[in-house]
Amino acid sequence: MKSRGGYGAATDRALALWVALARCAASVHRVSARDIQRYGLTQPQFAVLEVLYHKGPLPLCTIGEKLLVTSGNITYVADQLQKAGYLRRERSAEDRRVIRARLTPKGAQLIGRFFPEHAGAIARAAAHLSLREQAALTRLLKKWGRAVQAAEA
């Protein structure tokens, strides 16, 4: 096994980038998780409510794709949210195989009240970078993500 470094400058740089990205993502994720706990929701529950709040009714499979989780996980989270009265499921009139999730008024009120606070927590975490740095990092991460995704296709 090789010691730290020594894989060549480009590979060492790529590994350092990956480690920095992973550590940063974990730190921001912890901030987000602590904030979401205050609302009595799990992160997946909050994520489903948030995507429905911002995108409107969506098929469960589309929610799973947006949140990068399996259909089984989305079904489980939707079950929990439906039992709590935060969302309801509707079969598509065009394709009976498609089940859409829609926020109930109770769900819309909950996420509408909590999301601005959560957005503030994320903004405070991002404030460690200047606005210019935030814009540059967003641009670079999108560029990197699109390139990796295209290379996989």
Image (cartoon, helix red, strand yellow):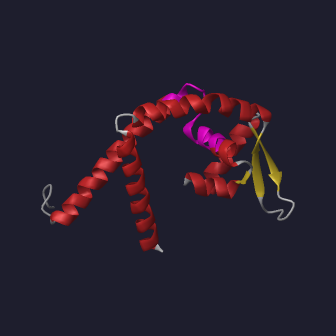
- Residue range in magenta is 35-50
Camera sees residue 70: no
At a point 61% along the width and 29% down the height, the residue shown is 114
Residue 53 covered by magenta stretch: no
Q: Is residue 42 magenta?
A: yes
In percent of width and height, residue 100 lies at 76, 53
Along the horizontal axis of the image, is 147 left or right of 76?
A: left
Q: In which quadrant of the rendered view does residue 70 lie?
A: bottom right
The residue at the point 54 percent across, 28 percent down is 37
**In the image, 96: left or right of 118?**
right
Picture mark count? 0
Q: Is residue 153 above or below residue 125?
A: below
Nearer to us in this view, 71 or 142: 142
Residue 92 x %, y %: 83, 58
Residue sitting farthest toward the front: 132
Q: Decide whether the magenta segment is chiefly helix, strand or loop.
A: helix
- Which residue lies at the image location 69% right of the left edge and 30% below the top edge? 110
